[in-house]
Image (cartoon, grey):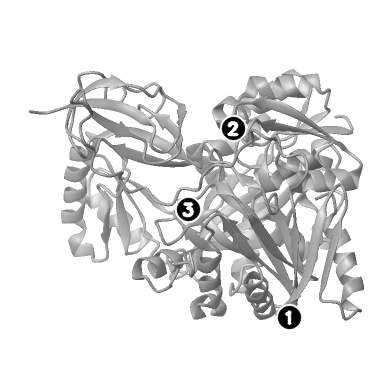
């Protein structure tokens, strides 16, 4: 919206002297809706027009709970998938050793990496036990929820 | 120093919108850097020009010093306003600006160093005769006993290389001191391979009180206190100005301490000196100083009528402070509630996504600082702040009433928000009475006192 806070206050002062309960202004540059509600005014402005096509909305994530119990795929390997969208890190801090590497033994609660979402660091448990045989997500890669991070050969 | 006619904003979100607003009033042209995730956001639509600074992750965009300097060079700006967070207190960045003859809107490089390192900041505070949390290292038990006696019980024993509560013991009774130190040393040895422990005054009930200062390197003034005690994991949720329920003596002493610290540093710019007020002992201690504009600056602006961004720009231009302490007057009371995209019923998990509808309260005495409109996108790469709701009242009770009514008219759809939590805080009797300590929010959350589950999904 290209209207300033002062513009809105000015419009409200004018509206206050009327009996109108709602005003919508629509121009090429902005849409403003003002409503009288419960003893006061509300304002709503809209982002419209030139939104980028590919900007795309990011699905909202609502839980960090582990995905369903994994079942082995055809080649007998177990998948470790990202439980949330965010930036995947393989080590606790830049320059330090990764949590796991190829051939590492992991247990269900072993931390295999971190996913950073909105500045919050979430440690990612393996969720399965066995030996890491493939690492598919790179350090500092942006991952989608459910994206395959690693594959594990289950312990006998 | 030079006049600033064209300014690069090295930030995003609500603070980018806030800086653009003041620049428009001052007739300064704005160039905004925006990551690929922010190219279509509100700040990018408000700025005169936009530079694509890189991919969404902060390290590759807003934190990339070379890229930001390159953007400033290309767009031929006079100055860079770093906002808060990101590069705002980064001495290397300020240095890179200086190398390129670009004004960094903030304090001097030496001041960034003096404040940025916590130990150095504490030493500076001691030199400036500010009270710091009393304490000292412990090696001999006799010395420890007399130190504890001097500080006064309860005392806290901490591991020197500590963290996460390991090696930490509260001692209330002098008879327990020896055993507690031995235990703490053992725990510290075990956890950190370093058995050195440290003894300090234990603040059972502390309030987070800070003082806004302005300085031109010579003249230093304060703009009063803010109370930011409503916190969860060091994240502030509600802030107010002035800090309520402080005795005049304590308030004066805290404000004066902040000014003294600024004078000691010959501070230039806007800064905030943070203190911990020990409610039980009635004393206060220096915590740290922030050398940037702060998220909660609007409450100070609201009660002083000053524009802190405009002040920052003026001071960075090398102009003297345009006002003396006597010119600063305080009117009424202001409260700010931070609106975050987070799910309070699910361990405060951040909730990126699309805000399908954003309805904010409007009217006199209400200010909204936000970059969110209906249809705005909240990218997963940055913090979860959606905006700030600021209200003014003749006194604190009136301000609370206005805030309760304003927040009831606030309606955000598409992402989870902390609006229900804010409403619960505003209705809690201890908050309404005023002067709660930093334990207020965590203890209510732990007790599950509030229903934070959003109805109908």
Label 2 residue SS? helix
The answer to whether the residues at label 3 and label 2 have Cβ atoms under 8 Å apart is: no
Q: Which mark is residue A39?
A: 1
**Residue B293 visible, this orientation:** no
Label 1: which secondary element: loop
Q: Quadrant of residue A11?
A: bottom right
Q: Which residue is mark 3?
A: B234
Q: Quadrant of residue B66?
A: top right
Can I make out residue B335 in this image?
yes
Subunit of mark 1? A
Residue B284 horizontal side relative to residue B335, left or right: left
Give the numbered dot on residue B113. 2
Q: Is residue A45 above or below residue B218?
A: below
Which mark's residue is nearer the viewer, 3 or 2?
Answer: 3
**Label 3: chain letter:** B
Circles 1 and 2: CB distance less than 8 Å? no
Residue B146 position within the rendered picture, expressed as x and y whole percent measured from the top left: 29, 56
């Amino acid at each position: 919206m290209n209207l300033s806070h002062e513009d809105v206050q000015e419009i409200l002062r004018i509206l206050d002297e009327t009996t109108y309960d709602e005003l919508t202004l629509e121009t090429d540059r902005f849409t403003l809706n003002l409503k009288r509600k419960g003893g006061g005014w509300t304002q709503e402005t809209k982002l419209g027009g030139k939104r980028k096509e590919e900007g795309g909305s990011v699905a909202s994530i609502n839980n960090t709970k582990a995905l369903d119990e994994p079942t082995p795929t055809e080649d007998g390997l177990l998948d470790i998938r990202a439980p949330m969208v965010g930036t995947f890190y393989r080590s606790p801090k830049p320059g330090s050793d990764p949590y796991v590497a190829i051939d590492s033994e992991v247990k269900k609660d072993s931390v295999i990496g971190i996913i950073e979402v909105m500045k919050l660091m979430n440690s990612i448990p393996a969720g399965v036990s066995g030996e890491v045989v493939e690492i598919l997500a790179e350090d500092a890669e942006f991952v989608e929820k459910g994206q395959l991070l690693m594959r594990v050969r289950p312990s006998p | 120093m030079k006049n600033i006619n064209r300014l690069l904003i090295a930030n995003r979100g609500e603070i980018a919108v806030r800086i653009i607003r003041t620049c428009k009033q001052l007739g300064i042209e704005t160039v905004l850097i925006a990551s690929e995730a922010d190219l279509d956001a509100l700040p990018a639509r408000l700025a005169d020009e936009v530079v694509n600074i890189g991919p969404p992750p902060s390290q590759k965009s807003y934190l990339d010093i070379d890229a930001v300097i390159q953007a400033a060079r290309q767009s031929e700006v006079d100055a860079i306003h770093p906002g808060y967070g990101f590069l705002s207190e980064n001495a290397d960045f300020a240095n890179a600006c200086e190398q390129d003859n670009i004004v960094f809107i903030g304090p001097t490089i030496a001041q960034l160093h003096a404040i940025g390192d916590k130990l150095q900041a504490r030493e500076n505070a001691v030199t400036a005769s500010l009270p710091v949390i009393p304490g000292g290292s412990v090696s001999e038990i006799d010395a420890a006993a007399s130190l504890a006696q001097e500080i006064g019980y309860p005392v806290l024993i901490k591991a020197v290389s500590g963290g996460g509560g390991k090696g930490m013991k509260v001692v209330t009774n002098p008879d327990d001191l020896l055993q507690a130190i031995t235990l703490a040393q053992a725990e510290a040895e075990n956890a950190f391979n370093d058995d050195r422990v440290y003894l300090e005054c234990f603040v059972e009930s502390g309030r987070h009180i800070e003082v806004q200062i302005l300085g031109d390197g010579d003249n230093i003034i304060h703009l009063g206190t803010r109370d930011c005690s409503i916190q969860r994991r060091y994240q502030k949720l509600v802030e107010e100005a002035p800090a309520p329920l402080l005795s005049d003596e304590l308030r004066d002493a805290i404000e004066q301490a902040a000014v003294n610290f600024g004078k000691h540093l010959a501070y230039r710019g806007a800064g905030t000196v943070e203190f911990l007020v020990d409610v039980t002992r009635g004393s206060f201690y220096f915590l740290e100083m922030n050398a940037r504009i702060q998220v909660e600056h609007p409450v100070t602006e609201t009660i002083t009528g000053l524009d802190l961004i405009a002040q920052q720009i003026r001071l960075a231009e090398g102009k003297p402070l345009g006002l003396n302490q006597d010119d600063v007057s305080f009117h009424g009371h202001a409260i700010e509630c931070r609106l975050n995209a987070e799910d309070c019923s699910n361990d405060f998990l951040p909730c990126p996504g699309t805000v399908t509808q954003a309805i904010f309260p409007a009217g006199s005495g209400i200010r909204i600082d936000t970059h969110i409109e209906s249809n705005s996108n909240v990218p997963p790469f940055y913090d979860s702040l959606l905006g700030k709701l600021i209200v003014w009242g003749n006194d604190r009770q009136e301000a609370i009433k206005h805030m309760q009514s304003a927040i009831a008219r606030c309606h955000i759809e598409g992402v989870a928000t902390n609006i229900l939590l804010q409403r619960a805080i505003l209705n809690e009797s201890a908050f309404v009475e005023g002067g709660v300590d930093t334990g207020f929010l965590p203890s209510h959350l732990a007790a599950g006192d509030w229903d934070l589950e959003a109805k109908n999904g």
